[in-house]
Image: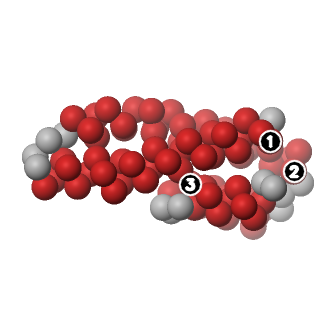
């Protein structure tokens, strides 16, 4: 389960960075929303999977509420999922 969460965490982080730093600037600077549409749905699914796996792993990894809150907050911070992988999942 931890390995699957690490994979989902990595993919969610990459999709968030692509959406934030590539798709969104293209949308507003070139008036082309296609990349946001293309990346938005996969990122949303990966985000939800990240949250579900974090909830499932909370008990297995024996995370306290503070650690669990940090792990959830890192899902909305750029590069946050990479921090979670390095600090809590290795």
User: CA–CA distance between discs 2 and 1?
Assistant: 9 Å
Quarter of the figure with residue 81: bottom right
Q: Residue 75, position in %: x, y? A: 56, 54
Residue that lies at the very extreme toward the bottom in this rendered image = 66
Quarter of the figure with residue 55: top right
Q: Nearer the viewer, mark 2 or mark 1?
A: 1
Q: Residue 68, position in %: x, y? A: 73, 58
User: CA–CA distance between discs 1 and 3?
Assistant: 16 Å
Q: Which residue is mark 3?
A: 75
Count of numbered marks: 3
Viewed as shown, does residue 43 lie left or right of 81? left
- Residue at left 89%, top 54%? 62
- Residue at left 62%, top 58%? 82
The dot on residue 61 is 2
**Residues under numbered marks 2 and 1 in contact, where contact means CB atoms less than 8 Å apart:** yes
User: CA–CA distance between discs 3 and 2?
Assistant: 18 Å
Q: Which residue is mark 1?
A: 2
- Local packing at callout 2 (Cα closer than 10 Å; few below 14, some 14-19, many 20+) is few
Q: Residue 44, position in %: x, y? A: 46, 38
Looking at the rendered structure, the secondary structure element under dot 1 is helix
Q: Earlier in the sequence, mark 1 or mark 3?
A: 1
The dot on residue 36 is none
- Residue at left 87%, top 50%? 61
- Local packing at callout 1 (Cα closer than 10 Å; few below 14, some 14-19, many 20+) is some
């Amino acid at each position: 389960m931890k390995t699957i969460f690490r994979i989902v965490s990595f993919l969610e982080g990459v999709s968030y960075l692509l959406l934030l730093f590539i798709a969104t600037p293209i949308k507003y600077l070139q008036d082309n929303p296609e990349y946001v549409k293309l990346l938005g749905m996969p990122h949303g699914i990966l985000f939800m999977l990240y949250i579900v796996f974090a909830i499932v792993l909370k008990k297995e990894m024996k995370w306290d509420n503070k650690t669990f809150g940090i792990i959830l907050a890192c899902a909305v911070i750029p590069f946050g999922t990479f921090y979670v992988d390095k600090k809590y999942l290795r």
